[in-house]
Every structure is written in C-alpha cells, then in structure tokens.
C-alpha cells in the first residue's frame, strides 16, 4: 500500500483504500459516524446534514439519489422512534417509583419497559451499522460515478465502515448510558458526545492517520466501560 494518495484529495484520500492515509480516513469517519448515530436525534441530524453536504459535491448525489435519500431517511425515522421509546420508558420508570414490586401491574409495566428498551437498542444497532456501511460505500466509490456496489473496493469499504462504526457506536452508547446513570442530563451528555464526535470526524477527514488513533481510543473506551459495568454488576450480585 501507498502511505499517501494526495491525488485523491479532498480529505486524506477519499476514494482510495490502497493508501494507508486513505484507509485511516475511512476508519475515523466511520467510527465517529457510529458515535453520532448512537447518540440519538441530535447526532443523527448532524450526520445526515453532513452526508448531504459532502454528497452534494458529486453529480446527482453520487449518481444514485434513491439509495442516498432512502438510507438517510431510515436513519432519521429510526432516531425519532428511538427518542419516543426513550421518553415513554423514562415516564414509565418514574411512575414505578414507590409501586409494589410484586403487584401484577408493576410486573407488566416493567415488562413493557424491557420490551421498549430492547426495541430501541435494536434500532440503534441497525442504524449505526447502516450509517457505517453507507460511509464506507461512499468513501470507496468516491472516484466512480455512479456509485455501484459491485467491485472489490466498494465491498471492502462497506464492510470496513460497518464494522468500525459498530465499535464507535458501542463506545458512545456505553459512555452515554454510564454518564446518565451517574446523574448526568441526557440532553447535555448527548450534546457533548455529538460535538466531540463531529470534531473527531472532521479531524479524521482532513488530517492523515487521525482515524487510526480515533479507532484505538474507541476500542479502549468501550473495553474499559464494559469492564466497569461488569464489575458493578458483580458487586451488586455479591451484595444480594
């Protein structure tokens, strides 16, 4: 592989997965995109707006406007549904405060909360993976028109984007959940995550090799938060 591919600028090698700098650019962009989508509505709006702004540089949104519009619309709808489910869950939890633990109504309410949480998490996972796949696909196909999922580079780019976006989304979700459990405001924490993710997103695009650092940080953060959560639950089991 080449180290740099300056003839493929903008960014650090958009449209090139045969240079180290270009691959790192894709990795950083996908990781931070996963973080934005995992945050929720604010992060999704930032991602979708940025995607349209970038794709506007290509003729007819990369030659496949239907794919672009449908993909981004799915992300927005999923974020809205996740927000509604989260609001309903918070209201239900507030209503359960002081309720009799063994009452049938309480058990039913807790089951409903669990179902909503499961659906919201499933939507978040699908959205993060979809965003990563779209980023990887667009990056790999940047120098082609229309974009077409068929050659080796487009398939590799899509797969890389999907995987590393999952890592970034997992790290962001664990950080958000931990901060909120610690008493942080959902809105404030979400804004902080979105701002940091967007700043790292821009850095990954314009500065060579930053994407590799972003991926390493996301992996370390996800593993540390996962370990901390496991230790907390282990302590609770001992107390019980």
Image (cartoon, rainbow, N blue to C red):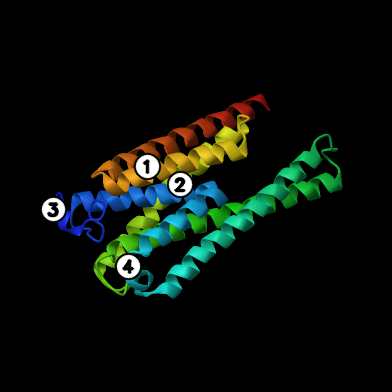
Spot occupied by residue 216 in the image (x, y as percentages of width and height): 33, 39
Judge left or right: residue 21 versus residue 63: left
Q: Earlier in the sequence, mark 4 or mark 3?
A: 3
Q: Earlier in the sequence, mark 1 or mark 2?
A: 2
Rendered residue at 77%/39% (across/down): 94
Rendered residue at 16%/58% (across/down): 7
- Name the image quarter holding the C terminus: top right
Badge 2 crowding class, 10 Å Cα cut-off, few under 14, some 14 to 19, many 20 or more, is: many
Q: In this view, does 96 lie above or below 235?
A: below
Q: Which mark is residue 35?
A: 2
Spot occupied by residue 189 in the image (x, y as percentages of width and height): 55, 37
**Residue 148 lies in quadrant:** bottom left
Q: Distance between the residues labelled 1 and 2?
A: 10 Å
- Secondary-structure class at tag 2: helix
Q: Which mark is residue 236?
A: none
Label 1 sits on residue: 200
**Residue 183 lies in quadrant:** top right
Tell me if label 1 and label 2 are in contact, CB under 8 Å.
yes
- Secondary-structure class at tag 4: loop
Q: Distance between the residues labelled 1 and 3?
A: 24 Å
Q: How many labels does the image show?
A: 4
Label 3 sits on residue: 2
Q: Earlier in the sequence, mark 2 or mark 3?
A: 3
Q: How far apart are marks 4 and 2 (CA)?
A: 25 Å
- Secondary-structure class at tag 3: loop
Rendered residue at 54%/49% (across/down): 42
Which label lies toward us, 4 or 2?
4
Q: Which mark is residue 58?
A: 4
């Amino acid at each position: 592989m080449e180290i740099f591919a300056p003839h493929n600028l903008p960014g650090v090698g958009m449209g090139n997965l045969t240079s180290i700098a270009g691959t790192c650019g894709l990795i950083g962009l996908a990781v931070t995109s996963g973080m934005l989508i995992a945050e929720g509505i604010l992060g999704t709006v930032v991602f979708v707006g940025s995607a349209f702004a970038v794709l506007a540089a290509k003729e007819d949104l990369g030659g496949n406007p239907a794919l672009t519009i449908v993909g981004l619309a799915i992300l927005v709808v999923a974020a809205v549904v996740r927000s509604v489910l989260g609001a309903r869950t918070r209201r239900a939890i507030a209503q359960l405060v002081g309720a009799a633990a063994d009452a049938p109504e309480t058990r039913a309410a807790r089951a409903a909360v669990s179902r909503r949480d499961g659906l919201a998490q499933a939507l978040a996972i699908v959205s993060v993976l979809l965003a990563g796949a779209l980023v990887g696909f667009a990056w790999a196909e940047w120098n082609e028109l229309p974009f077409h999922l068929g050659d080796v580079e487009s398939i590799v780019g899509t797969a890389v984007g999907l995987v590393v976006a999952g890592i970034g989304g997992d790290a962001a979700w664990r950080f958000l959940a931990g901060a909120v459990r610690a008493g942080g405001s959902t809105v404030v924490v979400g804004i902080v995550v979105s701002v940091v993710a967007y700043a790292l997103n821009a850095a990954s695009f314009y500065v060579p090799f930053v994407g590799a650092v972003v991926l390493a940080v996301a992996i370390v953060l996800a593993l540390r938060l996962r370990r901390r959560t496991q230790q907390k639950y282990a302590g609770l089991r001992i107390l019980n």
